[in-house]
Image: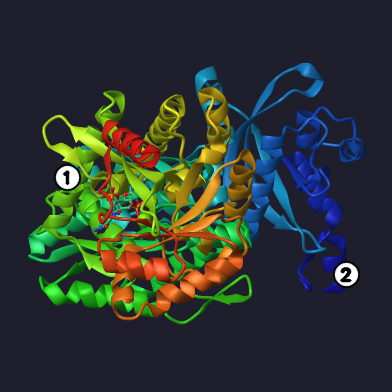
Amino acid sequence: MDDREGSLPFNFADGKVDPGLIAEVYDRQETGLWIFDIDHMRVLWANHKALEITDSETLEELQSRDMGADMSHSVEQRLRQYQTDFTKHDVSFSETWTLYPKGKARVLQVTMSGIRLRDGRMALLCEGRDHQEQQPDTLRSVEALMHTTVMISLFSKDGNPLYRNTASRAARVSLDTSFEEQFVSPNEAQDLLKLIEKERTSRIVVNILTREGTRWHELNMRTCNDSVTGQPVYLVSEIDVTELHETKERAQYLASHDALTGLSNRTYLKERLNQVMQNALDKNLTATLYLVDLDDFKMVNDSMGHAAGDALLQLVAAKLMDLVGPEDIVARLGGDEFLICHLEKPDNNYSDWFGRALLKGFEPHQVIEGKPRHVGLSIGYAHYPDDGSNIDQLMRHADLALYQAKTDPNNKCVRFREKMRRLRDEHLAVKKDLERAIHQNQFVLHFQPITSTRSDRVVAAEALIRWRHPEKGLIAPNEFIPIAEETGLINEIGDWVGRNVASMQTRLKDLDLSIPLSLNVSPRQLSDPLFVSRMQALPIETATDPELISLELTESVLLGDIPHAFETLSALKKTGYRIVIDDFGTGYSNLAYLHNYPIDGIKIDRVFMEDIASGGAIVKLILSLAKALGAQVVAEGVETIDERSWLSRNDCTLYQGFLYSKPVPEDRFISMLQTQVKIAAM
Ligand code: C2E
Ligand code: MG
Ligand code: MG
């Protein structure tokens, strides 16, 4: 048995075949066979036919060739893809190759399958047959299909894959992933299939599960008949558009969100608000628009730096998000202003409660850059549809309410009321009128004498502005100065007053009636960086003596509300002006502050005349402290002889009030002075 078997090339006993015989069998094949080690780009083994195909003298010569040298990147990638596919699946692939041994093209049909090497690596077993005549176009299209980065797949109607080109295979989690399984959201696959049934063709950008994770693919899909079976199939071509899509999304996000806080910005907000309002109408609800503004934000920015300001805004944004519901809109409108939109049942008290809940949320100290700080809010709100029929109107109305909340220390959450709009309208009308008044020179100065309590002689006067309105007649300053201050028109008006006081000064000098004149300067003027230089130029331009001009400032100067107040006052004083604190005692300042500023005089507010009637303890105190500081005192609003006598008895030498005279026009004032001179001469 052993003998007989030994003479045969087959060893039936252990199933082994003589390797030499096997080699001969392979060499006789009409199919070129070779094993390709893609990791080292070498042919490991080849049969005779393969040597001929590759035009190699010997196997050793073929084995020594570096196949990677001329291989394009895409071919290499494709081969590596096969290697991966073979590791996971028992499959084979057929391709048409054109080889150029010695420069002459040789077209082969190559079938590849995986073969595991002893060291465990996966190599490619290639079988190459001379290709039957093929149309060049067919050859090229087959080649193109292999090389393209477009993923092309063919699915049967039940979603099973029939064909995938190399790029498509490379992208799949598994080769037998069905059409639906590729989609992150199966619903999208269903919708697409439904659409295809109707339209036959479709294009979408959709989230696809790939070997690299979730990616955005643009899918072009259509139905056609399979060229092999003739059955209806889906032909899908896909490209990866993740980068483009994400860039677009990012750009869209940046355009619609505030970079600092991540909240919606103004642009995006309108879109969202429109939806909420529609919702409110549909469901019979009220949409409430809350405008939230930080108190003293500028101070945080100025005193703690911009980084702290940014941190504060981020903190507020996060806190507001915390305080509102998931359906509510929170947006940053710019600066320190935020918006919240909230849908609620039509109930008048709810919004107030909600606003107060926001305020309460900010009651505890917040920590900004490690430092605890109180963050104050002001809230104005308006209801849709009751307080406004569109977004713009609603925003304007909430803004009016906010304005009120900002100016009222006792009510920080205010609902819009119709009267606010009326007031604002009047305000705007006055502003327009005021602008015209400036251009048409409709202002006049009246002068009120400042008189000695002892002799009743006029020793000085205060210039007080009036507006000679073409229709409304003479308007008192209290009716337009606040609006002029708010709108900034006060700077122009203040200039006018300065020049006219100077020209009055010249007129008095020419008449030999020179006395000190005072004019009122509002805080807004004092904050204007150009104010000092203008006041420095005034005496030069008008040839007047600044020492004969007093500037009346309100107490706010002493309270630190005006930046660089000390420097400004010092510069004005250096120019020669006298500095006087007006309406003293009505603000929250105290006399001790006076000490820190270059002050020449104070005017005791007229409310203290009532104090005189009941003993005048406060006035006495002010007088003695002013004396200690060397400041001259004028009592304002003196209307009775008793008041004047009391002042005289208590060493207050100057007064101003209706007792002597109301403010009078320039000419009347001059004749008043002239009469006084005549009487003195008698
Ligand atoms: P003020 O500077 O305290 O001026 C005194 C105000 O008290 C004047 O009112 C004057 O008419 C009034 N008055 C004087 N004596 C008496 C009196 O015995 N009894 C009563 N009840 N009132 C008296 P006026 O002219 O209406 O001015 C009001 C305020 O308008 C001024 O208060 C001042 O703050 C402001 N103002 C007036 N002119 C100007 C100006 O040119 N520029 C600026 N920025 N403000 C001005
Ligand atoms: Mg005054
Ligand atoms: Mg006053």
Residue 431 location, x and y as percent?
25, 38
Q: Residue at x 60, y 40 (%)?
A: 576
**Up-down: is 88 above or below 31?**
below
| Image quadrant in which you'd find residue 224 | top left
| Mark 1, secondary structure of its residue | helix
Q: Residue at x 60, y 58 (%)?
A: 597
**Type of residue at label 2?**
Asp
Given residues 319 and 14, the one toward you in this image is: 319
Q: Does residue 536 appear to the left or right of 516 in the view shown?
A: right
Residue 291 location, x and y as percent?
31, 60
**Type of residue at label 1?**
Glu
Instruction: Mark yes or no: residue 173 visible.
Output: no
Disc on res. 484 = none
Count how many numbered circles sit on residues in the image.
2
Given residues 671 and 138, the one toward you in this image is: 671
**Up-down: is 513 above or below 651?**
above
Q: Quadrant of the N terminus?
A: bottom right
Disc 2 to disc 1, C-alpha distance: 126 Å
Residue 580 location, x and y as percent?
49, 53
| Image quadrant in which you'd find residue 281 | bottom left
Instruction: Mark yes or no: residue 417 visible.
Output: yes
Q: Residue at x 18, y 33 (%)?
A: 469
Given residues 83 and 108, the one toward you in this image is: 83
Q: CB under 8 Å between callouts 2 and 1?
A: no
Does the beta carbon of the residue at mark 1 sit less than 8 Å from ligand 1?
no
**Up-down: is 67 above or below 114?**
above
Depth-wise, is mark 2 or mark 1 nearer the camera? 1
- Per the image, the residue denoted by label 1 is 426
- Per the image, the residue denoted by label 2 is 3
Badge 1 density bin: few <14, some 14–19, many ≥20, Cα 10 Å? few
